[in-house]
Amino acid sequence: MTNKNGTIIRMSQIKKVYDTGKVKVEALKGIDLEIHKGEMVAIVGPSGSGKSTLMNLVGCLDTPTEGEYVLAGENVAGVTRDQLAEIRNRRVGFVFQNFNLLPHITALENVEMPLLFGGVRPKERRERASEVLTRVGLGERLDHKPTELSGGQMQRVAIARALAMNPDIILADEPTGNLDSSSGGDIMSLFTELWQQGRTLVIITHDAALANRASRIVEIRDGRITADHAPA
Amino acid sequence: MNTNFHVILSLFATSSRLQRKRAYLTVAAIAWGTVAILLLLAFGEGLKLQMDKNRRSTGENIAVMWMGETSKPWKGMPPGRPIRMRIDDLDLVRARMPQLKSVVGEVVSWRTALTYGRKTVNGRVIGTNVEYGEARKHYPQAGGRFLTPEDEVQRRRVIFLGDEMAKDIFGDEKPVGKVLLVNNAPYLVIGVMQHKTQMGMYGGPDSNHAVIPISTFRAQFGRDRLNNLLIETPKPEQMRSELKRLNEIVGAKYGYDPSDDRALPAWDMVKSSETTRKILIGLQLFLGIVGALTLLIGGVGVANIMYAVVKERTREIGVKMALGAKRRWIIMPFVLEAVVYTLIGGALGITVATLLVALTALVPIESNRVLSFLGRPTLSPQIGIATSVILGIIGLLAGYFPARRAASVDPAATLRYE
């Protein structure tokens, strides 16, 4: 579904204004960004720079106030909430800092969730979910609930969930932020592995070590992209 | 649509559950409301059935007329003239109105001495026609009978007793076949009336009077002016027009304006039973509304809990949205959850109410004067259907509004924070 030059994300002059009633906050002041298939892009910047806003827009959790956003050839402007949900389901796999697993269901059921929304039949759902969980090294933990898993394992479940629908991009927001350095390292290696398998990853991070593993670093400050370069 | 339903069921099955205590309280509130509405409606239904039965015990499709005074001038005659029909007028009415089911006259002797052995009771004695028995529901107890045409033709001295009066005179003795004195003339007791609880009456309850043939009455008491005229129509809707026709016939003979309703004031039981029916429907409606309001409070409880649940599950909702849940997949499991709590509570309430109603059936009402008017609480299929519909609507509403709030959750905002 990508166009000929392999562009997955194309943002042009994206602006996002939060209108809180009294004050208007301009979180993004005109972002131009292209991400190609197979890239591993780290987005870095201080807090309040607009990173999270950018992540919400890239992940179609929110829509821009102005500008054009084409995700895998599909224009995201002006679509309904349900269409946006469908785009998220098919195109984006989320990995969050705080995992955001549903605590009362098993690892397998968590991974099945996006497949459920994608209309996959129960039997195939279970097969695909256990297959991705096995791929991230949790084949033995299918029936464990998140509370019975370590932080690193939980993040692996989250990554498996992000991979389940085989999306165009994996979008990770501070994926190592809540992990100790050893399990953080494991997760970084897993991301590198996924990148080497040809997946497209966008990682928002403070972590210089993780950023340096990316193929490209985009620095953002004050709602604008200030630098866009390969890692040092 | 099929896959949607399957998704909704899967989501419902995997969504987090209420805390146990909360679930119990929610279900209990609905059960309580259901019991309230069912008992109120059952009470109303019982009252309706009983009043219907009691009302019919005076007679159906009948009208009773008194001898009144004209209130309008007619052909040069002033108003205020008394109209007094005679026993012989009955034949005139019968001849002119053959379509009537029965035309019955009543002649009354108040405070008449009825003596059996050493005991004398003063009571009402009514001279009337044979058809009175059917029209006014004077059914004999086993071993007795009502008046027959032969009694009337042969002016037999036979007497039919109301059950209370029979008890007053005879105590524990069997009255049928005994001879008692009516103003010192001997009468053979031919029957005693079956007990009935009477809603409408004139002159007094039927159980407290005695009935003799009208011909015998005329011979003994020497009176031929009617106290009451009673007509019975085959169908209730004919009563209005038949009363009009009756006034034309009697008005022509006695010289009064047929539209003058004071000449023969009528108690139209068809009309008054219609009124009673409307009052009872109103009463049931009122009881139903009171019950529904109680149930509504339970529904508000469910909605309240569901709102709290939406708040607690904001993150869960946000995560599901990020993973691609559409609006209906957020809304429907919540609605389903509320409906399930409501239906469990409703089923519990229906069970309890049914048991309570079944218990009231063990209380005997025949011997109790109050209960024989109030009747026995009764659950009808209509009540069950109405209650189920109300429960369903309450469950849907109690789920829908909180679920709508759930669907308006902003996933971007919920996922960002711890």
Image: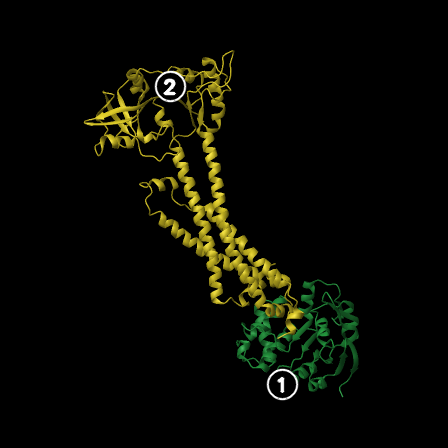
Chain colours: A green, B yellow
Q: Secondary structure at mark 2?
A: loop
Could you tell me residue B154's position as x and y percent? Answer: 28, 16
Q: Which residue is mark 2?
A: B226
Q: Which residue is mark 1?
A: A186
Could you tell me residue B386's position as x and y percent? Answer: 50, 48
Residue B55 location, quadrant: top left
Tell me the residue at 49%/52% (across/down). Answer: B294
| Crowdedness near tag 2: few (<14), some (14–19) or many (≥20) residues, C-alpha within 10 Å | many
Please state, as top left, top right, bottom left or bottom right, where the C terminus of chain B lies in the image. bottom right
Q: For the view shown, which residue lies furthest in the top direction?
A: B76
Image vertical order of residue B126 relative to residue B410, above or below: above
Q: Nearer the viewer, residue B221 or B92?
A: B221
Please state the chain letter of the residue tagged with numbered disc 2 in the rendered image. Answer: B
Tell me the residue at 47%/26% (across/down). Answer: B239
Q: Secondary structure at mark 1?
A: helix
Left or right of residue B90: residue B309 = right
| Amino acid type, residue under disc 1 in the picture | Asp
| Residue at mark 2 to residue at mark 1: CA–CA distance | 112 Å
Q: For the view shown, which residue lies furthest in the left direction?
A: B118
Q: Nearer the viewer, residue A167 or A144?
A: A144
| Crowdedness near tag 1: few (<14), some (14–19) or many (≥20) residues, C-alpha within 10 Å | some
Left or right of residue B330: residue B247 = left
Could you tell me residue A205's position as x and y percent? Answer: 69, 81
Please state the chain letter of the residue tagged with numbered disc 1 in the rendered image. Answer: A
